[in-house]
């Protein structure tokens, strides 16, 4: 994962969010592993700018501003996955390390193959993770002790452990099976009302960081508009009449 990758992810998910034809996204790795994390050469090149005579070099304040802007650029990349109104499914095989874990923590549904393993590896390279795993991972797994152990020691957890913790939904024998399951789930989501699916994702994301009372108030305001949609009429009519032809949204 280099700077070009992060820029492309940000651009891609912003386009998907605005694309009326897309309903759901599946992310998988094309290589032997899902992701080995950050491209170290690219990171060293970025940090190297601070020791040159270029505009990034200078006093501590200048260097700090450059680094902060770069970190936010990378954070916004994975934030765009969370903010995307379409559900995002990850299919993981092999290693899911460092920034790879940051990435899947931003997705909605996660599947993995037996060979998958997960690691917060940033401590091994002398830094604290800053792209979302420390913020999202504890809320997903609900085991603060294990998250801290992983973050402090860079230990690996297997796909079986990840499922037990709730990080992933299901484990499959082969990577192909995990991807097929992800695509099958995507198909099931794609035929549902986009008003209902996207509203549900937005509500779940909002409620994760707000009280029950705030979440209910948010949904009351949301549904006072969305309950007037044509999708609701089509879906409820099909259910009430037990139509053999599913509604098309």
Image (cartoon, rainbow, N blue to C red):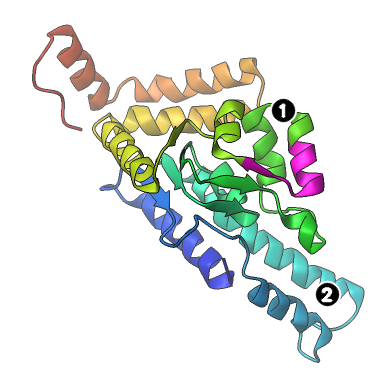
The numbered disc on residue 143 is 1
- Asked which secondary structure carries label 1, the reply is loop
Q: Is residue 56 visible?
A: no
> Within 10 angstroms of label 2, few (less than 14), some, or many (20 or more) residues?
some
Say which mark, if any, is on residue 63.
2
Q: Is residue 63 above or below residue 82?
A: below
Labels 1 and 2: the sequence-earlier one: 2
Q: Which of the image's four quarters has the N terminus? A: bottom right
Instruction: Name the spot of residue 101 as percent of width and height, x first.
Output: 60, 48
Eyeballing the image, is 82 above or below 216?
Answer: below
Q: Is residue 151 left or right of residue 93?
A: right
Q: CA distance from mark 1 to mark 2?
A: 36 Å
Magenta span: 147-157
Residue 202, which numbered label? none
Q: Residue at x 28, y 25 (%)?
A: 229
Q: Are marks 1 and 2 in contact (CB under 8 Å)?
A: no
Magenta span: chief secondary structure: helix
């Amino acid at each position: 994962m280099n700077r070009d990758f992060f820029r492309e992810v940000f651009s891609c998910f912003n386009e998907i969010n605005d694309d009326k034809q897309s309903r759901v996204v599946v992310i998988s790795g094309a290589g032997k592993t899902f992701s080995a994390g950050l491209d170290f050469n690219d990171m060293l090149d970025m940090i190297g700018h601070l020791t040159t005579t270029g505009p990034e070099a200078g006093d501590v304040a200048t260097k700090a501003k450059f680094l902060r802007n770069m970190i936010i650029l990378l954070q916004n990349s994975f934030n765009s996955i969370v903010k995307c109104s379409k559900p995002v499914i990850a299919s993981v095989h092999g290693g899911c390390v460092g920034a790879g874990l940051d990435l899947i923590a931003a997705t909605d549904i996660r599947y993995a193959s037996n060979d998958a393993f997960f690691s917060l590896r940033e401590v091994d390279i002398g830094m604290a993770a800053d792209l979302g795993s420390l913020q999202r991972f504890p809320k997903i797994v609900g085991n603060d002790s294990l998250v801290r152990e992983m973050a402090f020691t860079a230990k690996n957890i297997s796909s079986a452990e990840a499922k037990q913790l709730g990080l992933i939904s299901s484990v499959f024998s082969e990577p192909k099976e995990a991807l097929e399951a992800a695509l099958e789930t995507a198909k099931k989501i794609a035929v549902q009302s986009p008003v209902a699916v996207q509203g549900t994702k937005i509500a779940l994301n909002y409620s994760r960081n707000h009280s029950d009372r705030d979440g209910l108030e948010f949904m009351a305001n949301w549904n006072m508009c969305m309950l007037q949609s044509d999708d609701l009429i089509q879906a409820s009519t099909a259910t009430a009449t037990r139509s053999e032809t599913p509604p098309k949204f």
